[in-house]
Each structure stands twice: as C-alpha cells, then as structure tokens.
C-alpha cells in the first residue's frame, strides 16, 4: 500500500489521487460532487462504501475503474474541526465488499492521518512564528547597537526579510526629509 501526501495544506477539494490503468498513482483533477466516491465523501463528510461501482448510477468514472479492475471502493473523510480536509480511498479489484471491521479500521486510520496532518500544520506554524520572532529580535538588537547608523539596520532588515520571504532580493524605500533611497539586496 502506498500513501501520497498533498503538496499543499489544506489539500484542494478538487484534487483526488486515483489509480491509472497501468496501476501507478497519478493526479487527476476530480471535482467534489456526486460523480465520484471521493467527491461524495467531501460533500457529505462521511464514510462512503460502494460494494459495486459499476452498479452505482451516480459514479462517472466507470471506464477508469473497469480498466483498473476496480469493483469496490471505500472513501473515508479526513476530518479537522468538523470539516473534511481530504479523503482516504481504499480500492478493491473485483466486487468484494469491505467488512464492518475493515471499515472501522479505515476510519481509525483516517482519524490518525488527520491528526498527523494537523500536527504537521501546527509544527510549520510554530517554526514560522519562531523565525519571525528571531528576525524581530535580530533587528531590535542591531537598532540598539546602532542608534545613529541606519545602514546596519537596513542590511539586517533586508537579510531577515529575504530569509522569511524566501526571496533572493528585497527592495524597499527609505525616505527622510532630505534623503530618498531605494535599496536592493541580491543573495
């Protein structure tokens, strides 16, 4: 079994990972809606078990399922703060329904995945906040050391802005009563 993590958080409700006829995992945009199992899970925010996708009147991707030999699907929402943020999809070749225990286990996995995604998001927020606080501290330290010399202050602000914004250059205006300068820093 292979897992794929969405490149952005929260995952786009218009991006679902589905198997190609060759069996590899690729990205295909599938809008949330009744036409796909994942779309229904996102719309309704609940587990959807379809024992026979070929008999499902609303399912719009029968050609792909047939090419991949997929007969049974189980979609489980990844929920954060009562809203679905993604879908765990389990696909079976042939028509063989999942048992209640298997559905319950998939729901437990989905709950754990949602917790892991939320923890990763919180850790990223914490890191960003710490970087911002460190940058502010660095600028304040330089200001206190150079109360009359603005050049080191501007250089520190530029360096920290580049790092925080992940940019290679920063340009900013400096205006005083008799001075107007644009500084551009290149990394």
Image (cartoon, rainbow, N blue to C red):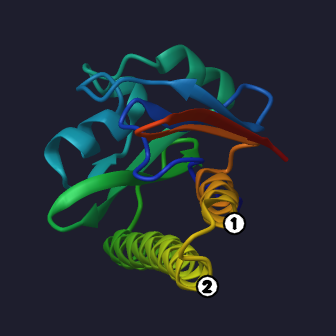
Residue matched to label 2: 145
Q: Nearer the viewer, residue 15 or 64?
A: 15
Q: Secondary structure at mark 2?
A: helix
Residue at coordinates 46% horizontally, 72% vertically from top-left? 113
Query: Crowding near pointer 2: few (<14 within 10 Å), some, many (20+)?
Result: few
Q: Is residue 54 left or right of residue 131?
A: left
User: Does residue 116 appear in the picture of this structure?
Assistant: no
Return the x and y of residue 23 as percentages of the image width and height.
Answer: 76, 36
**Label pair 1/2, CB-CB below 8 angstroms:** yes
Query: Crowding near pointer 1: few (<14 within 10 Å), some, many (20+)?
Result: some
In the figure, 1 relative to 100: above or below?
A: above
Q: Identify the disc placed on residue 152.
A: 1
User: Does residue 166 appear in the picture of this structure?
Assistant: yes
Q: Quadrant of residue 78?
A: bottom left
Residue at coordinates 30% horizontally, 22% vertically from top-left? 35
Q: Is residue 51 left or right of residue 81?
A: right
Residue at coordinates 44% horizontally, 79% vertically from top-left? 119
């Amino acid at each position: 079994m292979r897992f794929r993590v969405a490149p952005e958080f929260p995952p786009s409700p218009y991006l679902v990972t589905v198997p190609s006829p060759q069996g590899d995992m690729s990205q295909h945009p599938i809008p949330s809606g009744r036409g796909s199992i994942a779309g229904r899970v996102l719309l309704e925010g609940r587990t959807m078990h379809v024992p026979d996708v070929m008999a499902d009147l609303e399912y719009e991707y029968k050609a792909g399922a047939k090419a991949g030999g997929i007969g049974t699907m189980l979609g489980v929402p990844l929920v954060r703060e009562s809203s679905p943020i993604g879908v765990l999809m389990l696909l079976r070749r042939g028509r063989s329904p999942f048992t209640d225990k298997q559905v319950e286990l998939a729901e437990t996995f989905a709950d754990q995945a949602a917790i892991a995604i939320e923890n990763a998001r919180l850790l990223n927020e914490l890191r960003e906040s710490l970087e911002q606080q460190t940058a502010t501290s660095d600028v304040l330290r330089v200001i206190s050391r150079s109360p009359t010399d603005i050049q080191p202050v501007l250089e520190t602000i530029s360096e920290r802005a580049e790092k925080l914004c992940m940019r290679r250059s920063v340009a900013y205006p400096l205006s005083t009563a008799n001075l107007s300068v644009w500084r551009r820093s290149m990394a």
